[in-house]
Every structure is written in structure tokens, then in C-alpha cells.
Image (tube, rainbow, N blue to C red):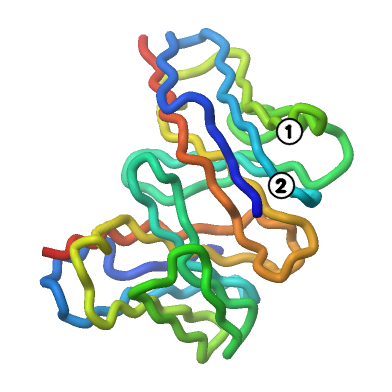
Amino acid sequence: AQSVTQLDSQVPVFEEAPVELRCNYSSSVSVYLFWYVQYPNQGLQLLLKYLSGSTLVKGINGFEAEFNKSQTSFHLRKPSVHISDTAEYFCAVSEVDTGRRALTFGSGTRLQVQP
Amino acid sequence: EAQVTQNPRYLITVTGKKLTVTCSQNMNHEYMSWYRQDPGLGLRQIYYSMNVEVTDKGDVPEGYKVSRKEKRNFPLILESPSPNQTSLYFCASGEFGAGGGYTFGSGTRLTVV
């Protein structure tokens, strides 16, 4: 079975500062990795995904993430955050080649960008 | 516009009164799924469907039913709701072989009193 751990439940940061949201996963098979963002009172929107190939993945809104297989991590980064990035961020994994195609989510990290 | 539509957005009901939350997608996706979101627990899968008439349990299926009679619709049924089913529910759809990247609906906030 797969699992996802998001190491920080809340991350406060000042506007224009860099940020890293941490995600570690556990799985006995190969996985796909995702980051989703949830703005207040909205559904989840895909930020970026890693399926294969280059371990550095670029997504929307200036976010990027790096897949590290040896450390089973998929941390999300942004070099300079804006007030509008305030939201909850979810890391998720999906096992390759299984019928369920289920996304297993972490518990979320609330990013609070302060002026 | 490609989207997943859930209705209603908000619902307050009483214990034991059957209810249905509808979900419809206009992208001709094979795969659809229901999740519930609870504080500190992230999203957990309730049921999923890989195509018409093909459904299976997710991680937390107790107290829920689903059906998939048409490709675009995947309703979630609570035959006898209880207070522990108070939650935020999301429907999602995607291509079966797409490696994830699902499209989510806007959510249904259910309160059972």
C-alpha cells in the first residue's frame, strides 16, 4: 500500500520570499506523483505531475518540484511567493499499472503568505 | 468548457434521510471517483469506477453506494446518513491510462445533524 506524508501542516511565509513544501511517500512499486492546490471554497487544481523522465518538473503559477527516488521525496518549491498563492497544497501518489488508479493524498499543507 | 459538475454545493440533512449527490463530467472520461475531505486527513477515496457498470470500493466505502449507468454520471448515494458522514465531498474524473491528473468538481459540503 502507498502512503504520503506532508511534513508541515502550515507554512507561514512573507511575500516575495522563497518557499518549499515537503512531501515524502512510501510505496513498494513505481509511482506517479502530483501536487494539487485548493483555494478557499474551491475544488482541487493540478499544479504539476511527475510521470517519468526529468526529475525536475515545472508546473503552473511558477511552481516546480523535484522527484528524488532515493529519498522518496517530491518537494514543491517556488522562488518568490505572492499573496495569491495562499491556499492548501496536497501531495498525492498513484501506483503505476494498477487498476484502481487511485490517488492517495497527504494531509495537506496550508501556505499562508503574509505581506 | 471541460468540467466536473457536482450538485448540490451545500446540503444539511437529518440522520437517516436518504440523499444523493450528483456528479457529471463532459470530457468523456472513463474513470470517475468520489473522495471525502476531512481536516487533518487529506482526501480519502470512497468509491471509483473504471467504466459504465464497473465500480469498486475505495478506502472508506462504508455507508455509501454508487452507480455508473452512463459514462458521464456517477452519483453518490447515502441511504441512511449519519453525523460521521459530515464532510466535504469531491468527485473527480480522468482518462484511465493518463497517469492521474484528474479533474475535480467544486465540492459538496454535507452536514448531517
Q: Amino acid at mark 1?
A: Thr
Asked which secondary structure carries label 2, the reply is: loop
Disc 2 to disc 1, C-alpha distance:
9 Å
Query: Could you classify mark 2 by the number of other residues whose Cα lies within 10 Å: few (under 14), some (14-19), or many (20 or more)?
Result: some
Q: Amino acid at mark 2?
A: Ser
**Percent position (x, y) of residue A82?**
47, 18
- Does residue A75 sit above or below A95 in this rendering? above
Q: Chain of mark 1?
A: A
**Percent position (x, y) of residue A104?**
58, 51
Depth check, front residue: B5 or A75: A75
Tags 2 and 1 in contact by the CB under 8 Å rule? yes
Q: Is residue A44 left or right of residue A101?
A: left
State the mark number for residue A27: 2
Q: Which residue is mark 1?
A: A72
- Does residue A34 sit above or below A9 in this rendering? below
Task: Give the position of the C terminus of chain B as an image quadrant.
Answer: bottom left
